[in-house]
Image: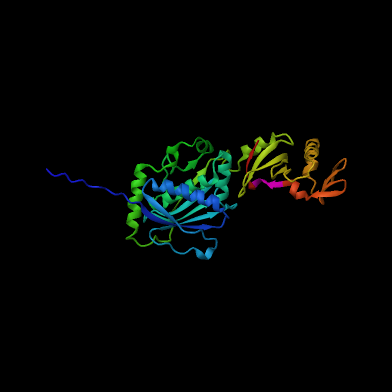
Amino acid sequence: MTFLLTAVLVVNLPLVVRTYDSAGVSARVLERAQQGAGVTLAAVGIEPIWRPPCHATGCVSKPKPREVIVRLVKSTPRSERDSLGFAAVDVGQRAGTLATLYVDRVDALAAQSGVDRGELLGRAIAHEIGHLILGTADHPRFGLMRAIWKADELSRDMPLDWIFSEDQGAKMRRRLAARASETPVVESVIAEARLSTESDDPVDNAAMWKRARRLEPSTRVTVTVSGAAPVERYFVRLDSAELVVLNLSAPGLPKRQLLNMAVDNPAWMAATAKMIYKDNNLRVGPEGVFVKDRKIAELTDVVEHLPRATVASIVK
């Protein structure tokens, strides 16, 4: 009797990923994102081939059948509220080639949940590539391809929350394999698959603003502004339009005295762009911050006015 041993070799299918970066993502964050997305895709038999990022609009050309484009941009006032990104999918041809990620919102969610920015960006990239290959705007209830990502889920970091299902992986391999004999996807977009986070208020994050109103002047807070990393600041006051904080990171500032002035009269501290607020030998006003008539800082470097629309999070 003869036994025939058959070895089955599973080879990862290549997928060229071209990145267009207008958000200025650092090399470290982008490398971490590509590594994370690569591991997630490799788990279902797809090997992304990352092309060097492009930073000019003219370098984005029509992709080939086994190519996709990932745009890394910053959100604008017209961007859909809470959206982390979206994939443009032609549901008729069941394929897509262009995905967009709002890097500033990904950064804000990473800061809120205490996870690595690059790791979260990589998960979002893998999610959107999943839509492009699967050719659907649908979202399941569980796993990487669910529609809404919550901060507590990210903090919990359960492995099953961040992988493709076995069925999704099999479909992605079949669809990607079929692309080799197909013409490039037509440019008419029928559906957009959106990945979102969950804010306290779907319209204007009013709950966060309401909580911040209860803060006492001089309270140390961590503030995240869209498109920037979280920073430590000291609360002064806020109204319906803006948040006012003190930036005391520069050396040589009389920190305790400035904080006491904010506690004594936060409205005066907030109004120093138009008036002078004095405490003994310390003077804060439109011309800057002075100690004994010696200028030690520009006013805008110490007293910061942050428009409400730009504030992603305020954490005590």
Q: Is residue 40 visible?
A: yes
Which scheme is used to colour this image of the protein?
rainbow
Q: Position of residue 27 (x, y in %)?
A: 55, 53
191 left or right of 56 in image: left
Q: Position of residue 261 (x, y in %)?
A: 81, 38
Front position in the image: 299 or 204: 299
84 left or right of 3 in image: right
Residue at the (48%, 37%) spot, across then down: 157
Residue at the (46%, 36%) spot, across then down: 158
Q: Dividing the image into 4 quarters, which one contains the C terminus?
A: top right
Residue 162 versus residue 134 in the image, above or below: above
State the image quarter where residue 15 is shown: bottom left
Give the dominant element type of the magenta stretch: helix, strand or loop: strand
Residue at the (34%, 50%) spot, across then down: 173
306 left or right of 168 in image: right
Please tell me how many numbered marks the rendered image carries: 0
Q: Position of residue 187 (x, y in %)?
A: 43, 61
Q: Dividing the image into 4 quarters, which one contains the N terminus?
A: top left
Looking at this rendering, what residue extends furthest in the left direction?
A: 1
Q: Position of residue 116 (x, y in %)?
A: 54, 43
State the image quarter where residue 214 is shown: top right
Q: Is residue 102 visible?
A: no
- The reply to whether the magenta stretch includes residue 160 is no
- In magenta, the rendered stretch is 305-309
262 left or right of 310 in image: right
